[in-house]
Image (tube, helix red, strand yellow):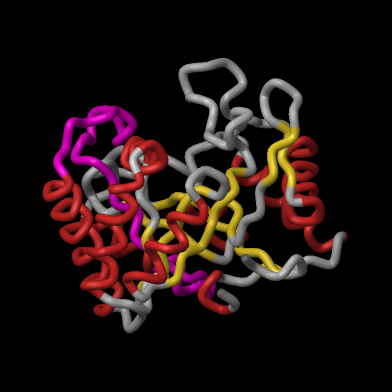
Amino acid sequence: MASRKIIDLNSDVGESFGIYKLGLDEEVIPLISSANVACGFHAGDPAVMRRTLALAKAHSVSVGAHPGLPDLLAFGRRYMDASMREIKDYTAYQVGALQAFAALQGTRLQHVKPHGALYNMAVQNINIWEATAEVIAGIDKGLILVALAGLNRDQIREIGERYGIRVAFEFFADRAYNPNGSLVSRKEPGAVIHDETAVARRVIKMINDGKVVAKDGTEVSLTADTICVHGDNPAAVRLIRGIREALKAAGIEIKPIGAFL
């Protein structure tokens, strides 16, 4: 777990495709400490990957791979009946592609964070976290696995130790939580939070108290190393600025996870 006075601030970026622009990368990236870059399966393409890495490098933002399911049409948010072998292959393919673009720019990847449905499938099936950890360890044991804080925390940490990699636990500032510590489905109203005051208050409560208020009003115990604000949230820039101001006021420093984990 990160120090109470240090936290990483991450966002999912590089999710445009061809002539289609998605997200606010130029505004968001200068405000975060770690960027999760789409690798072409759920979003992104080679040119977008290259430009996103260059933008992150220009602002001294650490970068990581954001591998998703091969489903551009639904932005990687539909569940797929994929085998563990297929998931390993999908992950290796995408991490390797972004790793190559990073090398061409004289930089290295910091972490790997599964995207969308793949991430949620892992929350429900611990074997997917293990498959991801196995691939990460085989590629580069310096890479950090980013996983949801809350559910299966001890099991995920044990997987990381077994494969010799670090695990960073993540809190979603702009997503509502269920009482069991999982994320409220995007199909439900209120799943995505757009109020910057509420989002900043949730972040400070999580860091200082180790708690998040679930959708039913109960408090869930939760501690995290990194905070995510989705780059495709129309309110992303406003939310991130609000979080940064709240963290500064509380004396909490923002650093990439690789600097303190």
Q: Position of residue 213 (x, y in %)?
A: 73, 33
Q: State the image quarter where residue 160 is shown.
A: bottom left
Residue in the foreground of this view, choosing between 50 and 178: 178
Specify whether residue 146 is in view: yes
Q: Residue at x 19, y 48 (%)?
A: 87
Q: Where is residue 148 in the image (x, y as percent from the top left)?
A: 50, 48
Left or right, 116 with respect to 255, comes to left
Placement of 157 over or under 180, stated as above or below: below
Task: Specify whether residue 82 is painted magenta.
Answer: yes
Q: State the image quarter where residue 92 is shown.
A: bottom left
Q: Residue at the right extreme?
A: 249
Residue in the foreground of this view, choosing between 82 and 244: 82
The residue segment tinted magenta is 54-83
Q: Residue at x 27, y 29 (%)?
A: 79
Placement of 244 over or under 212, stated as above or below: below
Task: Specify whether residue 19 is painted magenta.
Answer: no
Q: Residue at the bottom extreme?
A: 106
Specify whether residue 111 is in view: no
Left or right, 56 with respect to 222, comes to left
Left or right, 198 with respect to 139, comes to right
